[in-house]
Amino acid sequence: MFDIALSIPQWQGSGRPEHLPRGAAAAAEVIGRHAPLHALAPFTGAGVSGEGVNAWNAIMAQFEAAQDLLNRLAPRRLLTAGGDCGVDVVAIDHLARQYPDLFVVWFDAHLDANTPQTSPSGSFHGMPVATLFGEGPEPMRSRLGRPFDPARFFYCGERVADPAEAVFREGRGLQSLDIELLPKGAPVHIHFDADVLDPLAFPHLAFAEPDGMAIEEAIALITCIARRCDVVGFTLTEFAPADEQAAREGADILAAIVAAACKGNKS
């Protein structure tokens, strides 16, 4: 069982946010089937840039609101729905404080490892991994715990990288997932960006990349992780359906993915 489901309907971190609010609402309904749902109020407006990040005040305001709620409720097992990938910084930081030996598996087409200094777009959804490793904007960095251990972080389904992201990854030795490297029974958080999926099978994406993961493969991998380890966190991000019909169709697929993580969840 998960303690809470947290909706952070942040779209300001994306460079293509048009459909993310609709996707965030649908994703929140999906995770709310598995735990009591707590939804942050949407930040009104596009925000103001700063710290090398577009819409920085919107990003930071939502981070602080989520962190305050998590500090108050103190969940040990957490489901989260965005919005853009940047929402997972606060979720992972919270869980890492609960579990010093936490592992993270990052399902994503992109490395998300730009910094405010290297990002070609200034969009925060391309920076959460670098932020977790201590290279994010200073005001957020000062509210985070210690930088994450690279040995406990694994990419899965990644296939696109900016040059600076490739350098960042190599410098920290960030590996692709090998199930055998996850200790049996270890606490694991799964980040799931919907763009890890093949857009021919799952077209509800703002940043579709070809040659993605089959839906069945994603479910099988998450099921394997949940059976081997203790999934204490799962975050669903970047669902961008173009209309309500697409939201319903995409949510059915995402519900099966979330259920795969929940089936093996230790109570």
Image (cartoon, grey):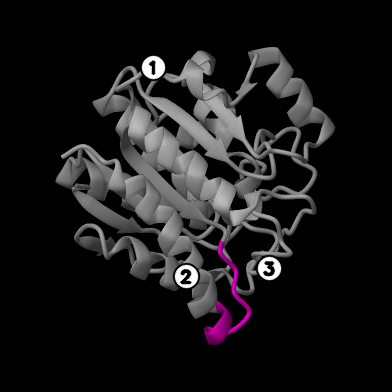
Instruction: Please name the residue that numbered disc 1 is placed on.
Output: 183
Q: For label 3, count other residues whose C-alpha is less than 10 Å away and answer few (under 14), some (14-19) or many (20+).
A: many
Q: Is residue 57 visible?
A: yes
Q: Relative to 60, is 13 on the left or the right?
A: right
Looking at the image, residue 13 lies above or below residue 73 = below
In the image, is residue 87 above or below residue 82? above
Q: Nearer the viewer, residue 187 or 62?
A: 187
Residue pointed to by mark 2: 251
Which label's residue is closer to the chain start, 3 or 2?
3
Magenta part of the protein: which range? 239-246
Amino acid, disc 1: Pro
- Residue 14: x and y in percent read 64, 58
Task: Pinpoint residue 79: horizontal percent, then vertical percent.
Answer: 32, 50
Q: Amino acid at mark 2?
A: Ala
Alpha carbon of mark 1 to alpha carbon of mark 3: how far? 34 Å
Give the alpha-carbon distance from disc 1 to disc 2, as whole Å.
31 Å
Q: Which residue is mark 3?
A: 203
Q: Quadrant of residue 205?
A: bottom right
Left or right? Give the position of 117 relative to 79.
Answer: right
- Viewport quadrant of the C terminus: top left
Give the main secondary structure, helix, strand or loop, of the magenta stretch: loop
Q: Nearer the viewer, residue 11 or 260?
A: 260
Front-lying residue, 23 or 87:
23
Is residue 194 rendered magenta in the image? no
**Residue at x-position 50% and y-position 58%:** 58
Asked if one can make out residue 53 in the rendered structure from this viewpoint, the answer is: no
Say which amino acid is labelled 3: Pro
Q: Quadrant of residue 28?
A: bottom left
